[in-house]
Image (spheres, rainbow, N blue to C red):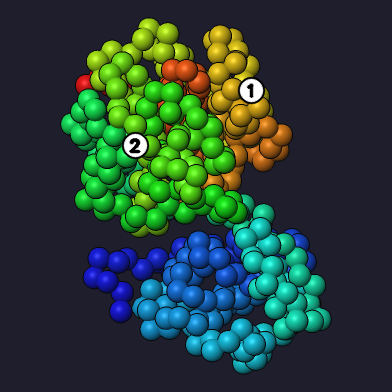
Amino acid sequence: MAQPDTAMTPIEEISARTTALQAQLCRLDLDGALLAQNTDLFYFSGTLQQSHLYVPAQGEPVLMVRKHLPRAQAESPLERIVALGSPREIPALLQRFGLPLPRRLGLELDVLPAQRYIGLCRLLPDAEMIDISDAVRQVRAVKSPYEIEKIKEAARRADAVQAAVPGLIEAGISEVALAGRIEAEARRLGHQGVVRMRLWGAELFYGHLMSGANAAAPSFLASPTGGRGLGPAVAQGPSLAPVAAGVPILVDYVFAYDGYLADQTRIYVIGKLPDTLRRAHEAMMTLQDELAGRIRPGAVAGDLYQWSLERAANLGYSEHFMGTTADRIRFVGHGIGLELDEYPFLAQGQSMELVEGMIVALEPKLIFPEMGVVGIENTWLVTADGGRRLTQLPDGVVSV
């Protein structure tokens, strides 16, 4: 049974999402899509119980559940939910519901393990396997009013976490101990504890908290900030180093509420920030606000990134914008929803046009290897009038 405080995704939501995916299937001349990744399962079925979801180009989807069937039936509004003892049963189950075996089948080839792909090729030898991941991500990129309300609530809780940070900072506390205090506050406010990312090998635990030069340490993660972390096994985030006075303390945290995410960064300092860093932070606040006015329907994601590069150069910070030298990250914002790295990417060379209802995190930041990181991040809704801000806490450096 679903927990009493768990809200089932409305059938109207699932139906609209299915219809949008089926339009993509028809455009690509596919007979159906077989989805197995957790986030896609949740988006299109309302549950992430261990399953395969078959979405035909026409007709009702079939959710085939290995574990746990009663919970999937309680959580999902779909009508066709059946037990699946083994993937070998998939062809028979499809035929049981009157669905012909696909000749062209869409798969999430950006995330599907090779072993599973090979198994499906053997199971359906007459089917041509086509990557459906781009189409799935395009469908998920545009949020419904239902999803927007979920993300607004995540943003409100993100604000509450950041508002609590000044009372948790003290001189000499280690970065990781301070992170623990903040994460406990997030958990108290209902953070789900899991921050999902789609990119293979990408991992994140709540977010990043780093101070001073530690924040400027690059890492493997696709982020302008890395952090020393606790060692090579993690290689990102807070370290055991103490938080000192007069250096920027970067708190870049994601609030995850009922599946949906809001991303936010604020800068704190014990005492006073050096004027060079204070001015740099104010420049990024200016860039963010100007960029937010440009995130309108029809704007091209790559053009927005190029504009940001040019604006950072005009402000005098081209050498530090989103990293330094070869460690520079070539984006200034990213889509956000059920995952932290959704479409669109405001990145170099991206041709995707923004659509009303997309939600993006804008994060213009400056990296100073010997001094630390300053900059800002907020979550924004794309509207006909430009970005509508969802995370509302003031952007200025907070002195404690």
Quarter of the C terminus within the rendering: top left
Q: Height in image: 54 above or below 390?
A: below
Residue 209 percent coordinates (x, y): 37, 35
Q: Height in image: 335 above or below 400?
A: below
| Comparing labels 1 and 2, the label whose residue is closer to the camera | 2
Where residue 219 sits, quadrant-wise, is top right
Instruction: Check if mark 1's residue and mark 2's residue have beta carbons within 8 Å.
Output: no
Indicate the secondary structure of the residue bearing disc 2. Answer: loop
Q: Would you call the spot at circle 1 few (<14 residues within 10 Å), some (14-19), or many (20 or more)?
A: few
Residue 70 shows in the view: yes
User: Residue beneath label 2, please?
Assistant: 240
Q: Height in image: 383 above or below 31?
A: above
Where residue 262 sits, quadrant-wise, is top left
Q: Nearer the viewer, residue 236 or 144?
A: 236
User: Residue beneath label 1, please?
Assistant: 325
Residue under the point 25% across and 65% down:
5
Residue 293 shows in the view: no
- First along the sequence among labels 1 and 2: 2
Question: Which amino acid lies under the numbered mark 1 shown in the image of this protein?
Answer: Thr
Q: Nearer the viewer, residue 368 or 26?
A: 368
Question: Which amino acid lies under the numbered mark 2 shown in the image of this protein?
Answer: Leu
Where residue 123 sits, quadrant-wise, is bottom right
Indicate the secondary structure of the residue bearing disc 1. Answer: helix
In the displayed structure, does residue 10 sit left or right of residue 40? left
Quarter of the N terminus within the rendering: bottom left
Residue 319 percent coordinates (x, y): 60, 16
Q: Would you call the spot at circle 2 few (<14 residues within 10 Å), some (14-19), or many (20 or more)?
A: some
Residue 241 percent coordinates (x, y): 34, 32
Residue 341 percent coordinates (x, y): 54, 46
